[in-house]
Amino acid sequence: MPILISDFVRTLKTQAMAEGFNAIGITAAKLPTEIADHLAAFVDAGHHGDMGWMVDTQTRRASPDVMWPQAKSAIVLAMNYGQGLDVFARLEDKSIGVISTYALHRDYHDVIKPKLKRLAGWFAKEASAQVKVFVDTAPLMEKPLAALAGLGWQGKHTNLVSRELGSWFFLGVILTDVELPHDTPEVDHCGTCRACLDICPTKAFTGPRQIDARRCISYLTIEHKGEIPHEFRNAIGNRIYGCDDCLGICPWNKFAQQASEAKLQARADLVAPSLKELLALDDAAFRKYFSGSPVKRIGRERFIRNCLIAAGNSGDQTLVPALQQLAQEPSALISEAASWAIKELQV
């Protein structure tokens, strides 16, 4: 490389900021063996639920250099998606459906990946390097890499926490076959705090940094394809896509700022959507309403299932006619949830 490596890395970080990223760090494209051991214990305990892809990709997920043997360095980037919303205030109005903060805007894959590709293209040209770009779509453990790269630490809720960004940020990774100087790993600043563990509505945490996804509302409303177990339905409340409780309660989020990227600004119609209107969506209307949103990927069937659980918890008798109509749908997933919701409202 014809320029000093320190100057090159400084320019790389400047380029990343110009693309709209809020933080960047560099570490080795290799994870400690204890990360793989922790993943194995998670899967062996069945805590991954029906996310079969975690089993299928477990070996490659253990470390970036297993997935891509030529990888030498990992460039990890963060982009803030904070909205300045009161996470818990939205849970009080049972007539609305609450969508997780990360999904209130454009699908982050569509926002971050083009930026990563441009940055990686610049890097590959300047460093004569090979690169691979990742935005939560490959068997890569982004959070441990980000902690090693100094972007934050994994809190007791398993999510990354930053002293500058709180917990409201997305991660992207560029792997390269070039050796780069590493940033200093972040240390744990959680201390004795366990607010995130204690607030979980479904008691999904089995201990600090240990989660049983099968009990997690985010898993149940997004990843889980079947009926939501009855034991969790009342605890879900009006959460119809994901859950922000463990993030929202974190004291470090007092330092979080609102997203600066225009495409990550919350859509007004997704902040407090009416359950009555959501329940009326047919497939075409669902696709149109959630065009460009990550919500679209779970499909109408699972989404209406979630809205029906929220309806059953709403106490709103005016929803019963809509529920009765949905109880007649051919989808067993929808009809079962509708029947449950009707019974809850008639108690």
Image (cartoon, grey):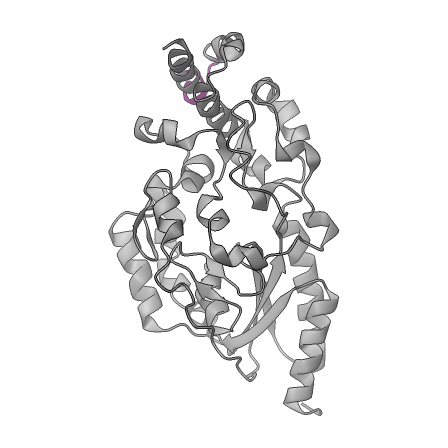
Q: Is residue 119 visible?
A: yes
Numbered circles on residues, count: 0
Q: Nearer the viewer, residue 156 or 140?
A: 156
Query: As displayed, is residue 228 above or below residue 166?
Result: above
Task: Tell which residue pokes out farthest to the left in this image.
Answer: 45
The residue positioned 35% from the left and 66% from the top of the image is 35
Query: As displayed, is residue 4 above or below residue 289?
Result: below
Query: x, y percentage for residue 64?
Result: 46, 69
Q: In the picture, residue 180 is in which quadrant?
A: bottom right
Q: Is residue 140 left or right of residue 264?
A: left
The residue positioned 36% from the left and 58% from the top of the image is 58
Query: x, y percentage for residue 148?
Result: 46, 73
Q: Quadrant of the C terminus?
A: top left
Q: Quadrant of the N terminus?
A: bottom right
Query: x, y percentage for residue 80?
Result: 62, 57
The residue range painted magenta reads 329-335
Q: Is residue 71 visible?
A: no
Query: x, y percentage for residue 121?
Result: 70, 70
Magenta residue check for 337: no
